Image (spheres, rainbow, N blue to C red):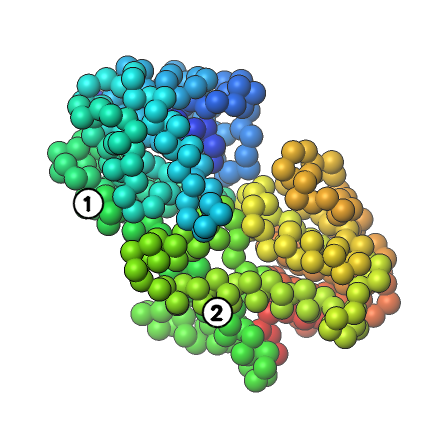
Amino acid sequence: MTTGAPVRVGVVGAGYVGLTTGACLASLGHDVICADIDVARVERLRTGDIPIVEAGLAEVVAEGLSSGRLRFEIGAPAAATNTDVVFLCVPTPQGADGGADLRYIETAAAQIGPVLDAGALVVNKSTVPVGSTRAVEDVLQRPDVAVVSNPEFLREGTAVYDFLHPDRVVIGADDRAAGERLAELYAGLDAPILITDPASAETIKYAANGFLAMKISFVNAIAAMCEAVGANVDDVVEGIGADNRIGTAFLKPGPGWGGSCFPKDSRALVKIAADYGYDFTMMKGVIDVNDEQKRRMVAKVRRAVGLAPGRGLGGAVVAVLGLTFKAGTDDLRDSPSVTMVNSLLASGATVRAYDPTVGVEPVDDKAEALRGVELVGSVNEAVKGARVLVIATEWPEFASIDLAEIATLMAADAVVVDTRNLLDPVAVRAAGLGYDGVGRS
């Protein structure tokens, strides 16, 4: 897949967004330098060793390396030297006030400013608050360089597909000509391109994630209502999803939303609105419902053990299948599973967990996030002697577990708490296990 004439592209940041952006732009025929300050990461990437779990990413990186269109370098200036377009793909973590922390993007801008070619484009690819293009311009101090916004809409697990087959490409530019120059970079993609002003482009990103989070919180609230009235949420979703004004996308009940985007962006949306004088009470409610949903999942485990509210779990063994915030990724950030595990540990439970992307001896941030959890290498090891089995992440292999064998390994009167509605309740009960799903009567 190629565009017209290749463009010299620099990408600052070889993390999740930056690596996907750089590799996919190289696959479109552009010459890409992807730079990062993490020397070890750069060395790994030069050999084609991908540090994250993402379908198809290893293949597009290998293609870029073999063709010579993709290179990895150390330091932001390397990405901005002799390049036409520079993407800023650095972290914008949640600050103490709920807004996005722009320190990394401002640092990157300061580093690339002196080496940018006249007429270059600087592109905010990171998720940034309204007004961030101006903030980058102020740091760059380069009136001969245009700064535009180009938010990403990548789902972890399908990021490569999403980049190469987007629903739309959004570009925010005060200068229409600058926006059209950036649009040419995506000429090889079959997707509508919306060129608007920077404030609108930045708002689109937050609004999209806020709306998707709202849909998940809505269906989780409906699931709670179904449990209360004796309805079946699967049938309710089928019934409302048949309405083409609603659809079924993101209307799947579960343990709550998490990951690197929804928690951060939903709170940032509330903060941005507040900064401009609007009290975004509906978004606050979306966040509250999500927090409540995580507590409801823990309460299900307590009921499965047979404990009244307020009593400790007293060493009860709980097996947890899945630790990442969703299937198809190794990302533990704001994972509902990890939140649940920590609550169970704090209540005195013994938690034994298995996840196909988390090793028995994780390192760095994973080790810290899972402190106190007994990590094992298989489903059977996790469930041995457990009083409760929690399906916490929708990994496909968990949908096909041998329930009869699981029942022989678990404690007497064991219960499955299926936070993803992944299993057939009839089959679980037929195996001699109790079952508690989400919104299932």
Camera-side residue of 275 and 321: 275
As displayed, is residue 246 above or below residue 367? below
Q: Would residue 260 appear left or right of 365 to someone viewing this image?
A: left
Which residue lies under the disc numbered 2? Answer: 219
Residue 197 bears which disc, if any? 1
Residue 225 placement, left or right of 167: right
* Residue drawn at x 77%, y 75% as measured from the top left: 308
Disc 1 marks which amino acid?
Asp
Q: Is residue 60 visible?
A: no
Q: Residue at x 44, y 64 (%)?
A: 284
Q: Are marks 1 and 2 in contact (CB under 8 Å)?
A: no
At 33% from the left and 49% from the top, the residue drawn is 205
- Between residues 202 and 420, which one lies in front from this camera angle? 202
Residue 23 locus on image (x, y percent): 40, 28
Between circles 1 and 2, the one closer to the viewer is: 1
Q: Say whether disc 1 or disc 2 marks the residue closer to the N-terminus.
A: 1
Report, in whole angstroms, how far the alpha carbon at label 1 lies from the one at label 2.
33 Å
- Residue 300 sits in quarter: bottom right
Q: Is residue 213 above or below residue 122?
A: below
Say which of 72 and 363 sits in front.
363
Coordinates of residue 1 in the picture (x, y in percent): 31, 30
